[in-house]
Image (spheres, helix red, strand yellow):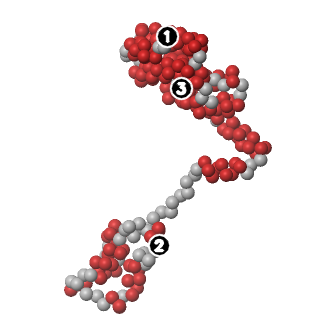
Amino acid sequence: MRYALGVSKPFTRFYGTSGILHDFLNDSSSNRKIEWAKYPAIITRMTKNIQKPASQYGSRGIKSSPRKSRKTWSGIKTTLKDLSCEALIGLLHDLYKANEDNRAFLHARFGPADDSLDPYLSIISRWINPDHSRNQAVSVSKAKKAISDYKKAIGRPEGIAELTIHYCEECIEFLDFCGYEEASYYDALILMFERALKAVQTADADTRAGYMERLESVMLSCDKFGYGVGIEMRELMSDHRL
């Protein structure tokens, strides 16, 4: 279907109503000599979009979609301030029941200090040292996420050190058992070993000595693996040894 005066719909959509009207008003060719006063309805239809507020129409006369309001923490914070203590406890309970990550976070933040690492240690073991007899899959990303989640929940330096060393030790146990050949698994192990070396630097002398002994055991175990893992770890150990 074509518009009045021979203007096609696609041309109107991409060129814009105001541009079309301007061309027609300034075209002096013989086939476009029109007495505009006789066509008030056409002029009204072609100019009605121009009269709309600029916020509703783009530069080409196309109506813009309304913007959706952004969801931010400030809006939730305002609502939370009005909740009673009982309502807040109920909300936390709902979050606790929602998924395992929430439970681990809340236990780490509010539970006894001695038990705060347990759920994260278990997650690392599950994903980096899975039980092949049960057809469990390996997931480096999920094992690393457990450390990130602990860091968000509490983030005590000694906790980070323990989790990163545990990751490395679990990798060694898994590789000794099955001889896993995925190169990315070894790359992640080297990176986690370096992260563990950095994490133990903030510990007191006695605790650091214990951590370094465990990391040295990991390093020596990696000499039997390929991919240059043992060499990389020896260089890292040399760089971070106090």
Q: What separation in Å lies between label 3 and label 1 (alpha carbons)? A: 22 Å
What is the secondary structure assignment of the residue under circle 1?
A: helix
Give the residue at the far left of this rendering.
Answer: 30
- Contact (Cβ within 8 Å) of mark 3 with mark 1: no
Which residue is label 2 attached to? 53
Label 1 crowd (10 A; few <14 / some 14-19 / many >=20) = some
Considering the numbered disc 2 on the image, is that residue within a helix, a strand or a loop? loop
Total marks in image: 3
- Residue depth check, mark 2 versus mark 1: number of the one nearer the observer: 1
29 left or right, relative to 82? left
Identity, as a three-letter code, of the amino acid under mark 1: Glu
Q: Please say if the residues under marks 2 and 3 sit with CB atoms less than 8 Å apart.
A: no
126, 192: nearer the viewer: 192
Is residue 107 among the parts visible in the rendering?
yes
- Mark toward the start of the polypeptide (3 vs 1): 3
Task: Report the residue marked by disc 3.
Answer: 143
- Structural crowding at the residue carrying mark 3, measured as other residues with C-alpha within 10 Å and reported as few (<14), some (14–19) or many (≥20): many
Q: How many angstroms separate mark 2 from mark 1 (CA)?
A: 70 Å
Q: From mark 2 to mark 3, how far is it between C-alphas?
A: 54 Å
Mark drawn on residue 216: 1
Image point (43%, 13%), residue name: 238
Taking depth in this image into account, of 213 and 3 the one nearest to the observer is 213
On the question of residue 2 being in view, the answer is no
Comes first in the chain, label 2 or label 1: 2
Residue drawn 27% across and 81% down?
Answer: 26
> Residue 46: x, y in percent?
38, 79
Give the residue type at disc 2.
Answer: Pro
Which secondary structure, mark 3? helix
Picture coordinates of residue 140, whole percent (x, y)? 49, 26
